[in-house]
Amino acid sequence: MKLKAALLDKDSVRRSLIRVSHEIIEKNKGTDDIVFVGIKRRGYPIANRIAENIKKFEGVNVPVGKVDITLYRDDLNNISDLPTVNDKEIGVCVQGKKVILIDDVLYTGRTVRAAIDAIMDSGRPSSIQLAVLIDRGHRELPIRADYVGKNIPTSKEEIVSVEILEIDGEDSVKIYEK
């Protein structure tokens, strides 16, 4: 893979997540009945950061859970004969709550669809909203994000790489050519 462009550095990622945090508070008229569910892997640390921002701004602890979508993928048979699910529990009660589903990149929409299925198996939220750091387009399902850190038009031949400090040792968003 060849680096095509470095799109966001650590400060840009931080500013994007701060803006998304404010938008969540504004759209929901506060934080009542909100829970965050981060899609494993990179969605979970992003969800924790947004929760930390909201605690700074509002003084409220928003519960944060995580969802492993492995068993809900529509391409499960193509991946492995024996999928491994490390954690079936979301870690937060979603029943009657406003769930903000959080991920790093929104692409085809299939990951989000799988996460919604997993959440619905855990309870019946009053609503599900979607927050992503990057929306790169190319949807295959009718799914859109309610909160977007940055829209990045891409070709299907490009790879968007989101690196998160907690997992990768740095915060950045880069585009690579295949």
Image: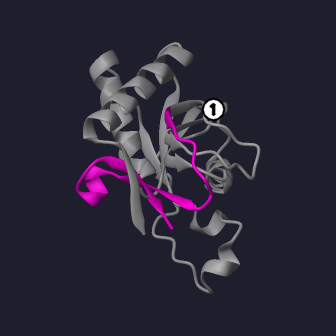
Query: Which amino acid does the dot numbered 1 rest on?
Result: Gly
Q: Is residue 54 left or right of residue 27?
A: left
Nearest the camera: 145 or 123? 145
Q: Residue visible at 55% across and 17% down? A: 27
Q: Position of residue 141 (x, y in %)?
A: 75, 49
Q: Position of residue 162 (x, y in %)?
A: 40, 52
Q: From the viewer's perspective, is residue 176 above or below residue 112?
A: below
Q: Residue visible at 54% across and 30% down? A: 147
Q: Residue visible at 66% across and 51% down? A: 109
Q: From the viewer's perspective, is residue 154 above or below residue 21?
A: below
Q: Residue visible at 53% across and 41% down? A: 152
The count of marks equals 1
Viewport quadrant of the N terminus: bottom left
Asked whether the viewer can see residue 31, the reply is no
Q: Quadrant of residue 46?
A: top left
Nearest the camera: 64 or 14? 14
Magenta range: 149-178
**Residue underneath mark 1:** 96
| Tag 1 secondary structure | loop
Q: Is 84 inside the magenta-drawn segment?
A: no
Q: From the viewer's perspective, is residue 67 above or below residue 146?
A: below
Nearest the camera: 73 or 170? 170
